[in-house]
Image (tube, rainbow, N blue to C red):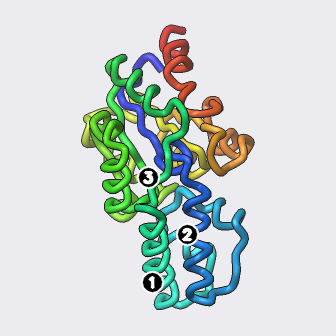
Amino acid sequence: MRNVQLVIFDWDGTLADSASQIVGAMQRAIVALQLPPRSDQAIAELIGLGLNDALLKLYPDADLGHLRRLLDSYRAQWLAEGAGEAALFAGALDALQALRRDGLRLAIATGKSRRGLDRSLAHHDAIRGLIVNSRTADETASKPDPLMLRELLADEGLQAEQALMIGDTEYDVAMAAAIGMPAIGVTCGVHAPQRLLQAGARTLLESVADLPAWLATARSA
């Protein structure tokens, strides 16, 4: 951890407590399109993937037209929820501010679209000023492909061991593990702790709020 210069965060389920909003919007889109029902758990399991990949997993036999309509309906439902913006987890903003004070650079790697991430950052303006770089699923490969991490490293001129990935799903951890980047799992999101450990998480924290203290200890060890 002494070499870490860049900390990369997932958004939904890691910084923002958005799982219930995502599931609710998707369920209303499914009803509106009269598609076969899917459980809340089945939808929640796919949070973190790019939306197209998540839809293909929910409806692998659906034709492209249905998937596109589902995508459009999902986006409309998301925006209908008062701009669709979830609150940050308690202590998340304070944690990011502490990391920046410690001289670390901060980035985001998310399954959201660029439009969605920009809207979230505009809503949470205090975080926007702390983030130096980001990648979204619609401008690069979706998780768990590590391409978005490779691109962030290239932008920053860093090696994988000089960065740290923080996420709540096995997709976050697996894409980091694929390129030798250390990853930490947070248990406030959608995937069970054991899944995060099996994917290769170095350790588990309850939330991002616990990260500055853990990292300070790890870097001084």
Query: CB under 8 Å between callouts 1 and 2?
Result: no
Name above or below for residue 214 compared with residue 93: above
Q: Quadrant of the C terminus?
A: top right
Task: Locate residue 84: give its quadrant.
Answer: bottom left
Residue tagged 2: 25
Element carrying mark 3? strand
Name the amino acid, label 3: Thr
> Label 1 sits on what residue type?
Arg
Dividing the picture into quarters, in which one does residue 106 lie? top left
Reading the image, the residue beneath label 3 is: 110
Q: Nearer the viewer, mark 1 or mark 2?
A: 2
Determine the CA span between mark 1 and mark 2.
15 Å
| Residue that label 1 marks | 68
Q: How many marks?
A: 3
Instruction: Indicate which label's residue lies in the foreground, 3 or 2.
Output: 2
- Type of amino acid at the residue the image marks with label 2: Ala
Q: Residue furthest top?
A: 220
Between 10 and 53, the residue placed more toward the observer is 10
Q: Secondary structure at mark 1?
A: helix
Tell me if residue 118 comes above or below residue 210 in the rendering: below
Q: Measuring from the top left, give residue 156's x and y in whole percent.
A: 26, 36
Binning the other alpha carbons within 10 Å of mark 2 as few (below 14), some (14 to 19) or many (20 upward) gives many
Q: Earlier in the sequence, mark 1 or mark 3?
A: 1
Give coordinates of residue 77: x percent, y percent. Answer: 48, 73
Name above or below for residue 131 compared with residue 66: above
Mark 3 neighbour class, 10 Å CA radius: few under 14, some 14 to 19, many 20 or more: many
Looking at the picture, how far across and down is residue 2, in whole percent? Answer: 44, 16
